[in-house]
Image (cartoon, helix red, strand yellow):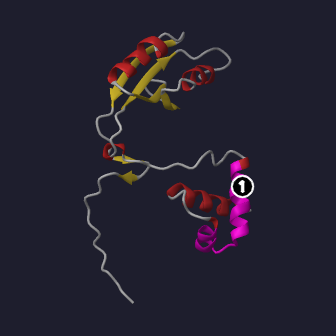
Amino acid sequence: MSTQLRHDILQLLHENSKLQPDTIADMLNVSKETVEKAIAQLEREHVILRYSTIINWDKVDHQRVTAMIDVKVTPQREVGYDALAERIYRFPEVKSLTLMSGAYDFSLVVEGYSVKDIGLFVSEKLSTIEHVQSTTTHFILKQYKEDGVIFEDREEDQRLVITP
């Protein structure tokens, strides 16, 4: 399997994880078996970790609070940031964790049922970890775009309707 084919399959699945292998095969002009084999290999190699859906939670009667938390830490000798990252990402409240450059070392996305839940997570779990120096919490008020998808696209389709 070529590197380009792997990349093309991954790109198509990233844009729409519901695409079936026969559709991907038609789009890439390869056989369905080639696509199925490639996807199976990518799953075994943990390149494809899971298939996901982007949901506009504001349109669902689902109360939850999301916060982005910046965390400054002191990296540990010989393991750097990895041991601290592992300890933090194992909390069920943590939905994502990223090591970044700048004033803070980690950026976390945390979910809870209330602002108080997030506050308790920070004060009782996160900030009590040895080597955590400081945190800054930003509550997400409204999300406009995620992973390239605009939630409330107000631009109307300007294309002409063509009928056969």
| Residue 41 x, y percent position in the rendering | 73, 54
Q: Label 1: which residue?
A: 40
| Residue 79 x, y percent position in the rendering | 66, 20
Q: Vertically, is 153 above or below 75?
A: below
| Residue 101 x, y percent position in the rendering | 48, 29
Q: Is residue 1 left or right of residue 25?
A: right
Does 69 appear in magenta?
Answer: no
- What range is drawn magenta here? 22-43
Principal secondary structure, stretch drawn in magenta = helix
Q: Is residue 53 left or right of residue 68?
A: right
Q: Residue at x 58, y 25 (%)?
A: 90
Whether residue 25 is visible: yes
Of all residues, the one furthest to the bottom in this rendering is 164
Q: Residue at x 60, y 64 (%)?
A: 20
Which of 63/8 is in front?
63
Q: Mark 1 packing: few (<14 Cα in 10 Å), some, or many (20+)?
A: few
Q: Is residue 164 left or right of residue 132?
A: left
Residue type at mark 1? Ala
| Residue 161 x, y percent position in the rendering | 32, 81
